[in-house]
Amino acid sequence: MDLKSKPLTKTRINPGAKTKGGKRELKKGGFLKVWGPGLIVMLADTDAGCLITAAQSGAQWGYTMVLPQLLLIPILYMAQEMTVRLGIVTGKGHGELIRENFGFGWACLSAGTLALSVVGALLTEFVGVAGVGELFGISKWITIPIATIILVGIAFSGSYRRVEKVGIIVGLAELAFVVAMVMVHPQMNELLSGLTSIPLGEPSYIYLVAANVGAVIMPWMIFYQQGAVVDKGLSKKTIKKERHDTAVGTLITQGIMIVVVVTFAATIGRLGKHPSLNTVGEIVHALVPFIGSWQAKTLIGASMLGGSLVAALVVALAGTWGITEVLGWKHSLNEHLNKKNFGFYAIYALAHIIGAVLVLANVGLVSLAITVEVMNALLLPIVLGFLLALEAKALPDKYRMHGFYKWLVTILCLLVMIFGLYMIGPATNLW
């Protein structure tokens, strides 16, 4: 489908948007009406799995793991910024654009792998929720059903804006990790020294770098932010403000990752110990000698719970948008449940229910987690490949990348794809 030959004035506006002449008003404080998709998707990026990866990185390689996190900031921003332009200019979600530009078969492939990845990611988030509850002696049979009901209920409120606000507020609990970092008193001279030391010759260091690269751009992030700017009804005039939203979100999520790395570099990493850090409980136990039991449980628990809940919300919506876009079903959060959008809400609720049931049933969680890691690694090249192709094909020339910036983004995306594929071998060796 050649979008150059088709007028782009019929950008889809969501039913709840306040518009005038098809354009959203940007009056005083207008950025608050525009900001949100970038913040919430970035907070979701720092989920339980990512925080655990950051903790392992700091514990094993200390401050040398801070530089990779800094270098990932522009890569993450560049990838997500493309979704902003694609969503706002075309008024269509990622799955819908793939179907229109590359055919129903490719769209089904993309949506199918996304669905598997989403269910797998939800397992991780529910395991995180269960882990936090167990810190305080609360059974997963209580925490997971409650979390499921809350997450499903939020989406059924009939307002994208409400879902977004709740998600951001919950996700900001991740900042509790900053307090933990301050309490361990990291040494600035050691941090600066770590920024200049990069042990590229060490296989375990490269493996953790690859794990961090693979974790920074999740496939579902692409689907979510593009679907979110469409559902929010943003016009072309808001592209600049939404870029700012994405940039601030990028700095926050990578800032949190750096905080976690520094916290464990200043504690476990400094002592040269390498304890197992694969669960919420193990992370809390590792910090207890340095900040105290109650403090560790409260601060780490709040961070993990906030990251898990906002990620579960975003991941499920990303998968639901992607699937319903490909199928051509109604897919907006701005309408209450009715016959026309029943499929949208049913898929969203079912994703949470399946994830919750699998975690409660303990159905091979270790092997499932490994499968998810491999699935994300395989899906990332597909998603980023489609993203670059759509940016070049679905947008009018005015809104495309050009010159040096275009080549820079393309090369960085290719590097992320390579690191993602690199993770497949080490992950499958765990089976």
Image: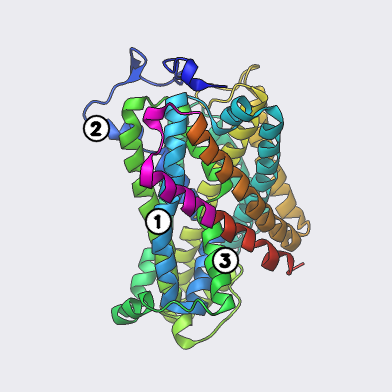
Q: Position of residue 333 (x, y in %)?
A: 52, 27
- Residue wearing tag 3: 280
Q: Who is closer to the viewer here, 86 or 299?
A: 86
- At 48% from the left and 16% from the top, the residue drawn is 5
Label 2 close to label 1 by CB (< 8 Å): no
424 versus 375 height, above or below: below
Q: Is residue 175 found left or right of 224 in the rendered image? A: left
Q: How many marks?
A: 3
Residue that label 1 marks:
73
Q: Is residue 66 above or below residue 141?
A: below
* Magenta stretch: dominant secondary structure: helix
Q: Image check: 430 left or right of 67?
A: right
Please tell me whether residue 330 belongs to the stretch shown in magenta. no
Between the residue at mark 2 and the residue at mark 1, the CA separation in whole angstroms equals 27 Å
Residue nearer the viewer, 215 or 163: 215
Q: Earlier in the sequence, mark 2 or mark 1?
A: 2
Relative to residue 202, is residue 14 depicted above or below? above
* Residue 64, position as x, y percentages in the image: 43, 76
Three-letter amino acid code at the position of disc 3 = Val
Residue at the location (40% across, 56% down)?
A: 73
Q: Secondary structure at mark 2?
A: loop
Residue count near mark 1 (Cα–Cα under 10 Å), binned few <14, some 14–19, many ≥20: some
Identify which residue, 220 or 389, lies in the foreground.
Answer: 389
Give the residue at mark 2: 29
Q: CA distance from mark 3 to mark 1?
A: 26 Å
Residue 132, position in %: x, y? 56, 61
